[in-house]
Image (spheres, rainbow, N blue to C red):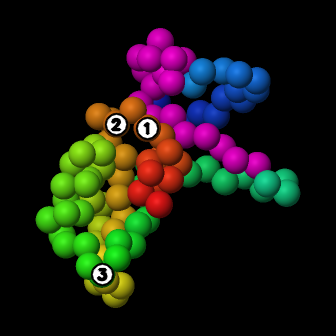
C-alpha cells in the first residue's frame, strides 16, 4: 500500500465522512480551501486561547469530552493551547475549531 499525502478533488455533494468510512486506508481527511488563487490546508491541529478564568481542569475535561489532545501549552501566553483532533473524534479540524470558538 502507498503511504503519503494525497489530495482528491471532490466537487459537488460528496459525503466525505461516508467516503472515509468506506476507504479504510485513509488515516485523516481535511479540506483544502481556495481563496484568491491560494490553497490553505488545515491539518489536525488548531490553536485555542481560553479565558483566564477557565481552569486547567476544566480545559482537560472539555478536551476529553471532545476527543482532543493537547500538543503544546504556550509558555508565553496564558491559556493558549495547540490542540489535536484525535482519531476518536467524528469531527474534522475546522468543525472542532468552530466548536471551541
- Sequence-wise, the earlier of marks 1 and 3 is 3
How far apart marks 1 and 3 lie (CA) works out to: 26 Å
Measured as percent of width and height from the top left, residue 9 is found at 72, 29
* Front position in the image: 25 or 11: 11
Q: Residue furthest front?
A: 53
Does residue 1 appear in the picture of this structure? no
Residue stretch in magenta: 17-34
How far apart marks 1 and 2 lie (CA) works out to: 5 Å
Which residue was labeled with disc 3? 52
Q: Residue at x 30, y 45 (%)?
A: 66
Rendered image: mark on residue 91: 1
Vertical comparison of 75 with 70: above or below: below
Rendered image: mark on residue 36: none
Q: Residue 25's image quarter?
A: top left
Left or right? Give the position of 35 relative to 6: right
Task: Look at the image and tell me in which quarter the N terminus lies.
Answer: top left
Which residue was labeled with disc 2? 89
Amino acid at each position: 500500500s502507498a503511504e503519503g499525502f494525497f489530495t482528491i478533488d471532490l466537487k459537488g455533494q460528496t459525503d466525505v465522512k461516508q467516503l472515509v468510512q468506506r476507504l479504510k486506508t485513509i488515516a485523516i481527511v481535511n479540506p483544502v480551501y481556495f481563496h484568491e488563487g491560494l490553497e490553505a490546508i488545515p491539518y489536525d491541529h488548531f490553536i485555542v486561547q481560553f479565558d483566564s478564568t477557565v481552569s486547567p481542569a476544566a480545559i482537560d475535561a472539555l478536551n476529553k469530552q471532545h476527543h482532543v489532545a493537547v500538543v503544546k501549552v504556550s509558555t508565553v501566553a496564558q491559556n493558549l493551547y495547540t490542540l489535536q483532533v484525535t482519531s476518536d473524534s467524528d469531527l474534522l479540524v475546522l468543525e472542532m475549531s468552530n466548536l471551541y470558538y
